[in-house]
Image (cartoon, rainbow, N blue to C red):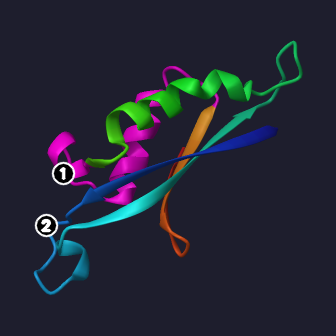
């Protein structure tokens, strides 16, 4: 099995307002998010790639256009936890990139949420 990954980044704010008022994440705060997308394939294409990294531009364009420097609570129809962001990106890009099997959302150097199939 061949595997590759690529990282993207965006900055955004959110409020996890379902938490108690005593929880620090219930207040407005932001992150410099790091998104890692992972792909796998039993075979390589004619160029020797699982997926050409330059063909992943749709992910970068989406993050830059839709999420970068935005308040996620205002633009997303779901509670903007890192776990939900990972699942959303997986569901959005799996039809475009069948080799996609994992999306990781890193909010800080010590916190990473993963959605994997």
Decide which of 50, 1 is in the foreground and name it.
50
Whichever of labels 1 and 2 marks the residue nearer the N terminus, that label is: 2
Q: How many marks?
A: 2
Task: Quarter of the image for the N terminus: give it.
Answer: top right
| Residue 45 percent across, percent down from the top left | 82, 17
| Residue 107 percent across, percent down from the top left | 45, 64
Residue to which mark 2 is pinned: 17
Residue shown at the point (25%, 49%) measured from the top left: 72
Residue to which mark 1 is pinned: 73
Task: Quarter of the image for the C terminus: give it.
Answer: top right
Left or right of 61, for residue 21: left
Q: Is residue 36 magenta?
A: no
Q: Reply above or below: 38 against 55.
A: below
Q: Is residue 79 magenta?
A: yes
Q: Reply above or below: 25 against 15.
A: below
Label 1, label 2: how many angstroms apart (C-alpha)?
9 Å
């Amino acid at each position: 099995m061949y595997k590759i990954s690529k990282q993207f980044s965006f900055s955004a704010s959110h409020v996890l307002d379902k938490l108690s008022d005593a929880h620090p994440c219930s207040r407005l705060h932001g992150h410099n998010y790091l998104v890692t997308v992972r792909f796998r394939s039993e075979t390589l294409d004619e160029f020797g790639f699982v997926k050409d990294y330059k063909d992943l531009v749709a992910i970068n364009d989406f993050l830059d256009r839709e999420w970068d420097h935005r308040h996620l609570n205002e633009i997303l129809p779901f509670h903007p936890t890192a776990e939900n962001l990972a699942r959303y990106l997986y569901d959005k890009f799996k039809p475009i990139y069948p080799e996609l099997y994992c999306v990781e959302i890193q909010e800080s150097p010590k916190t990473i949420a993963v959605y994997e199939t």
